[in-house]
Amino acid sequence: MSLQLIEENLVRQNKAMVLLSVLLEEEFSRLQQGAPQQVSLIELSIQELMRQIAAERFSLRRLVGAFSPGAERVAHLFAAVSGEVRTTFERLLGMLDQTEQKCAVQASKNGALARALFDQSKKLLTFMHDQIKPKNTSSYAATGRFARARSDARILTGRL
């Protein structure tokens, strides 16, 4: 019974990792489209899924410890289980590892794209701010705006 629960847990984790992979790919496409609200919604789903995966892993460690006291990982059970069960566990763990690696690569791509978009936006805002900022902040014109003073010498006329 306990081995069946361990196997079911591994199957759930595999399905969750496949879903995480799909969500990360969707997040990447939304980042490329420049849709920040949609990216935020997907990011919330990813965070919730990660929380559920962490809970499944905690549950798996508890199940492994209940089956074989002192064991913390599924790999520690290999000596205590039959060949067929061991093969199943190895296959599920292999699939889980492969999917985790794929998710890690995609998450790295998403992070790099998000940082690049942030840098681009920051530089554009800085450029725009520099373009509208007054060049000479020491004097005002008669209209209440900053005057553009000429840098060459002039003769002052008028009342003081």
Image (cartoon, rainbow, N blue to C red):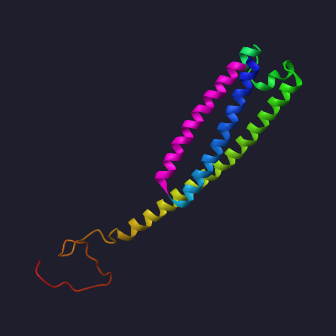
Is 106 on the left-hand or right-hand side of 146?
Answer: right
Nearer to the camera, 75 or 159:
75
In the picture shown, does residue 132 fall above or below 65? below
Dominant secondary structure (helix, strand or loop) of the stretch shown in magenta:
helix
Residue at 73% x, 18% y: name it: 2
In the picture shown, does residue 10 fall above or below 20? above
Residue at 67% x, 45% y: name it: 103
Nearer to the camera, 66 or 117:
66
Nearer to the camera, 5 or 49:
5
Is-magenta flag for residue 67? no
What is the count of numbered marks?
Answer: 0
Find residue 1 and report its image quarter: top right
Find residue 53 and report its image quarter: top right
**Image coords of residue 34 (percent x, y):** 51, 59
Is 98 on the left-hand or right-hand side of 37?
Answer: right
First to last magenta residue range: 35-63
**Image coords of residue 110 (percent x, y):** 60, 52
Is 82 on the left-hand or right-hand side of 157?
Answer: right
Is-magenta flag for residue 42? yes
Q: Is residue 13 visible?
A: yes
Residue at 76% x, 38% y: name it: 95
Find residue 82 and report its image quarter: top right
**Image coords of residue 73 (percent x, y):** 75, 24
